[in-house]
């Protein structure tokens, strides 16, 4: 790839992370890989240097996730801990929250999960009802979340809730840091058809008592005063663009891994005179999958570049498109790869069949394919809304 698109420094990062991923491989020990990646500075490449990070951007962090994924060992919590939570705290946290959380998130010794999805709201996050009310200087948080990844691994969860605006009575979004063992904060593991060490949980908050400093950005005077009416919303959006870029990286890495295994197989497997990879019916879909993944990466790089340059609005559209393109490319790449292996595509030994389910994650989360098509229809093309 020309320097125009990726600097020499980023190419070196890519090569170094790829080497780490290759050493750990598909049957990796998540804890060992997380810890080594943290020590090498990869988990916090996007976080500010003054808080122990690498001083880079989401473009750098997406390289880390893509390359680990391409080696068969994606670290899903990279999407959540440094990308969403690290970004939100670095941009909007109080000095104390930054000092408490960023160095640990950067070196991997502390992890934060992120919870926005609710059972009765789903894709319609305007409908979330997890609510915080004041009790003296404390907050009492009540509500439910679903499909939240890695809550058991995380020291705390960044929970999107609402507080009542004292002037208008309207509920406004706000983010709370809820430590894992806070009384009243319960989790139940959801039985998912996914072979991953990161599990999904349903969460309940029953009058969970939190100190004032659990609110990202400090008290309401910070959240809704100096930061303006919609500071909570700004905080949320600041985290959602990195999340989409990182989900694209996750999908591209997985797609590359699958195509890599299929190409190896197609070069060797011979049932007629030539290896199956010589048949265009096998070769062309793999070539197409490779092209689709490259195109998705280009859009991901655009989104990351815009985000790192401070263009949140421009990054919003590009990050949605990148997530869409990468999710679709990943699903097709996995499907093609599984088919290339014939019966072996469905064996545990070759390890591709489980990717059929895993690849669907990038199509539905963190925002579904349809909701991105809705966004582009309305925001980009100016078409009317059906809902
Ligand atoms: C493995 C995994 C990990 C996850 N991790 C997290 C996490 O860490 N934190 C977190 O907060 N969430 C997480 N999620 C949740 C994820 O973000 C949601 O599943 C996603 O936002 C979709 O919400 P839903 O499942 O309620 O689907 P629904 O909103 O019920 O949608 C169901 C279907 O209807 C379609 N649909 C809905 N509305 C429209 C419309 N207006 N137009 C057209 N089609 C529509 C959707 O596209 C989808 O196909 C995770 C999910 C998975 C599967």
Image (cartoon, rainbow, N blue to C red):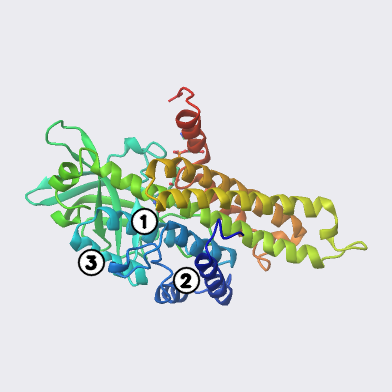
Report which residue position mark 2 lands on: 30
Report which residue position mark 3 lands on: 100
Residue 39 lies in quadrant = bottom left
Q: Secondary structure under badge 3?
A: helix
Q: Earlier in the sequence, mark 3 or mark 1?
A: 3
Ligand 1's quadrant is top left
Residue 46 rendering spot, x and y as whole percentages: 39, 62
Residue 130 rendering spot, x and y as whole percentages: 26, 43
Q: Given the current orientation, which residue lies at the most extreme left position?
A: 136
Q: Is residue 153 left or right of residue 220?
A: right
Crowding near pointer 3: few (<14 within 10 Å), some, many (20+)?
A: few
Rounded to the nearest angstrom, the CA distance separating label 1 from label 2 is 21 Å
Residue under the point 51% across and 47% down: 323
Q: Earlier in the sequence, mark 1 or mark 2?
A: 2
Q: Secondary structure under badge 1?
A: strand
Residue under the point 52% across and 42% down: 321
Report which residue position mark 1 lands on: 188
Quadrant of image for the N terminus: bottom right
Quadrant of image for the C terminus: top left
Which residue is at the front of the view, 188 or 321? 321
Q: Is residue 247 visible?
A: yes
Residue 99 rendering spot, x and y as whole percentages: 23, 66
* Marking on residue 24: none
Q: Is residue 107 left or right of residue 263?
A: left
């Amino acid at each position: 790839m020309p320097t125009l698109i990726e600097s020499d420094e980023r190419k070196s990062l890519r090569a170094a992370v790829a080497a780490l991923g290759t050493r750990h491989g598909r049957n990796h020990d998540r804890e060992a890989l997380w810890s080594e990646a943290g020590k090498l500075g990869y988990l916090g490449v996007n976080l500010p240097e003054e808080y122990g990070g690498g001083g880079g951007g989401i473009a750098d962090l997406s390289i880390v996730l893509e390359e680990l994924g391409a080696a068969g060992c994606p670290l899903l919590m990279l999407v959540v801990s440094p990308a969403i939570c690290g970004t939100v705290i670095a941009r909007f946290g109080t000095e104390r929250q930054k000092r408490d959380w960023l160095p640990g998130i950067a070196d991997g010794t502390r992890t934060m999960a992120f919870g926005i999805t609710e059972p009765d709201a789903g894709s319609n996050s305007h409908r979330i009802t997890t609510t915080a009310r004041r009790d003296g200087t404390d907050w009492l948080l009540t509500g439910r979340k679903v499909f939240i990844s890695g809550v058991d691994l995380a020291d705390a969860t960044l929970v999107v809730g609402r507080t009542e605006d004292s002037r208008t009575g309207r509920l406004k979004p706000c983010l709370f840091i809820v430590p894992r063992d806070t009384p009243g904060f319960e989790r139940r593991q959801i039985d998912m058809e996914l072979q991953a060490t990161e599990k999904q949980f349903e969460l309940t908050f029953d009058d969970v008592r939190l100190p004032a400093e659990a609110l990202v950005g400090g008290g309401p005077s910070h959240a809704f005063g100096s930061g303006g009416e919609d500071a909570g919303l700004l905080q949320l959006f600041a985290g959602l663009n990195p999340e989409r870029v990182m989900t694209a990286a996750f999908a591209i890495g997985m797609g590359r891994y699958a195509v890599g295994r299929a190409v190896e197989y197609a070069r060797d497997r011979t049932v007629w005179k030539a290896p199956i990879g010589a048949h265009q019916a096998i070769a062309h879909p793999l070539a197409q999958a490779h092209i689709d993944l490259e195109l998705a990466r280009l859009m991901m790089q655009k989104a990351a570049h815009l985000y790192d340059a401070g263009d949140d609005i421009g990054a919003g559209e590009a990050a949605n498109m990148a997530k869409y393109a990468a999710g679709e490319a990943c699903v097709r790449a996995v499907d093609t790869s599984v088919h290339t292996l014939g019966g072996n595509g469905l064996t545990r030994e070759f390890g591709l069949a489980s990717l059929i389910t895993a690849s669907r994650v990038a199509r539905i989360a963190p925002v579904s394919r349809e909701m991105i098509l809705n966004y582009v229809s309305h925001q980009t093309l100016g078409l009317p809304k059906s809902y």
